[in-house]
Every structure is written in C-alpha cells, then in structure tokens.
Image (tube, rainbow, N blue to C red):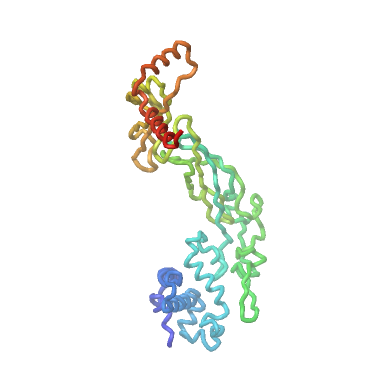
Amino acid sequence: MAKRDYYEVLGVGRSADEKDLKAAYRKLAKQLHPDANQGDAQTEAKFKELNEAYDVLKDPQKRAAYDRFGHQAFENGMGGGRGGAGFGPDFNSSMSDIFEDLFGDFMGGGGGGRGRRGGGRSNGATRGADLRYNMEINLTEAFTGKTAQVRVPSSVICETCNGSGAKPGTSPKTCSTCGGHGAVRSQSGFFTVERTCPSCQGRGQVISDPCSPCSGQGRVTKERTLSVNIPAGVEDGTRIRLASEGEAGMRGGPSGDLYIFLSVKPHEFFQRDGADLFCKVPVSMTAAAMGGEIEVPTIDGKKARVSVPEGTQTGKQFRLKSKGMPVLRSSQMGDMYIQVAVETPVNLSRRQKELLRDFEKEAKNNSPESEGFFAKAKAFWDGFGS
C-alpha cells in the first residue's frame, strides 16, 4: 500500500514551521500512543506512521530531501536502507528526540538534550539546581501570617562575565571536535553510536580564556538575603516556591527555584486539626458539679467566656465558632473546641475530707454513670454464679 503524504499524516501544510510541526505531532501522539490504545493494531500502525513522518519533517535536511524527491528520498539506498521502515540507521537517536519532544516538558527537561542535535547549544547553558530551606514557625505566626527574612548561600551569576564564563572582551568559541553539536558520532556496522563530546563535555562551545572570578563557570557562591511572604493559615509541611531564587545556571542558563519547607512548632495550649483548634481545659470538681463560667485563651491572644452547665463531665466539648485557624487563601475560619477535664481535688485538709464523707452519706442519684456501671457489673458477675 502506498505511503501517505507526511504532511497529510501530521495534518499540516507544506509551509508549516518547526513550531507547527511539533504542536501537531504532540496532539496526535497523545491520541494515538499505544499505552492509551492497548490492543488496537490499527491505531498502533498510525502511531508508527506519525513517528516516521515527524522524524523526517522535523529534520531540515531530511525535509528538504522529502520535499524534492518524496518518499523515494528514503528508498533504494537514498535514505540509508529499508530495514527500518524508511527510518534508516539513525532511527534510535531520532526516536529519542521524538519522545523528548513529546514528554520533555512534563519531565522538567525543557528539551535540554536537544542542544546536541540540529545546530548545537548556543553557549553550553544549563539550568541551575533547585534549593531547599527549612523554616520553623510557631502556631501564632501560622495564624497571622508573616514576612520573614532568610539568608541563603547559593550560586549566583558572575557579575564580571555576566554568566558567560569567558573573560571580559572574549567569548566562547564553537567546539572544533563536534562542530557545536555537543556530541560526536561513530559508525559501527549498521549502528550509529552517539556520545558526549569529550572536548566540550556536551556544551558545544569551549572557553579558551576563562573568567578569573568564576573560573569559567559563569557563577560564584554568595549568601543572599531574601524576603518570604508566609500567608495566614499555613500548615506543617507547607511548601512555598520562590521562582528563580535557586542556584544560578551554568554559563548564563536559567536559575533554579528555592523551596521553603515550613514546620509549625507545638503550642502550649492548642492542638490543631486542619483549620480547627482543640484546647483541653481543666475544671474544678465543684465548678463542674454546680456549673458556672470559665475564661479560656484564643489563638489571637484574646479571651473567650464559656458557660459550663451543672453536672459537666470529663470529655464534654464546647464549640466556639470561627475561633480556629484561617483556611489558607480564603476568608473562612475554623472552629475552636474546648475539651473539659474535671479535676479531682488533691491535698485535702481534714475538714475537707469530713465534708466529702458527709456528702457521700447523703448522696443519692448524684453519680448515675458510676451507679449504672456497677449495677451492670454486679449482674455480669451474678451470671457467672460468683
């Protein structure tokens, strides 16, 4: 069966530029990829046809040959053999570029490896590394938010050479070994082996007269002071990204990012659960028995009054609406829960003990939970004949 026109396969016109070709390929490759169409032989064949078309049209030399001779440019020995379905001996390296074009942006590569093909890199620039900074804040700061100053030692662009790595007044030169491609190739039978150029280490350029302060690296180590805005409502483990505040790139490459990882210290009064706060408040036995009002602290440094009804037991919770933590990047507030813990008196005087004994003698139906429990326990024991 005759092969379809490569431009038709990609759905573009013959005047399409490199950007149009790449956009068309990415769109179709996602639709036709075998992982998304398992067991569909027809779609798999279309995917192979798509890769073949893009491999030819994205290469200026192959595209020129195709525009002039059509499919015959890669047949009868003109394209390097028919064993690879028209791909020739450069099939493996070409497929590597194809999948880099499709998935490179998602993997964070940004197409960096492409600098070794189709003209080489302009100056051997590489992206700088991302940095991590651990910061500890207290719960009150997490409630209000804050602006913090951090001191970060990192690599910054060399001001002497402006990141080029070359001595002022000079410039990097194209590597004579690889011709600026960053890689050299050798033929071994039917296979083409590509390896990083040993002269320029894959940069495509060499610096014969390096900058003294940075030793040709294009960057120097320096401590910087940065301002970090911590929004109200952040939680333990929150990550804040400062774009382009990481290490400077090599030889003028883009800077990495700085990530601030926050940890929130435990508070003496409050325990946090999302946007809600819990405060365990001890209440005297008499206050719990007769009822009354207590004052409790709130996270904003103020006070709140809580009415404790008669007969309040340990574990009873009282909700204070909107007295919790702010919800990150919203106007909503969590709640605060008061957890009562009835405190048993200690260090009793003789008089106090006498009063408690008199109370115990007169007590009747004052402790329904304990009386109910022991009544059930007695029935349980009776069931065993004890």
> Residue at point 37% right, 23% down?
288
Left or right, residue 217 beside residue 8: right
Which residue occupies the extreme front position in the image?
385
- Position of 197 with respect to 352 (left or right) is right
**So how many labels did they put on this image?**
0
- Where residue 172 sits: x, y (%)? 61, 61
Residue 66 point in image, percent of width and height: 47, 82
Q: Is residue 317 left or right of residue 132?
A: left
Q: Position of residue 40 (x, y in %)?
A: 42, 76
Question: Along the line of sight, which residue is nearer the eye, 105 or 29?
Answer: 29
Where's residue 362, x and y in %? 36, 17
Residue 17 appears in the rendering: no
Compared to 12, does 358 lie above or below?
Answer: above
Q: Residue at x 54, y 42 (%)?
A: 134
Q: Nearer the viewer, residue 65 or 170?
A: 65
Q: Residue, x 50% and y 16% (percent of image)?
A: 347
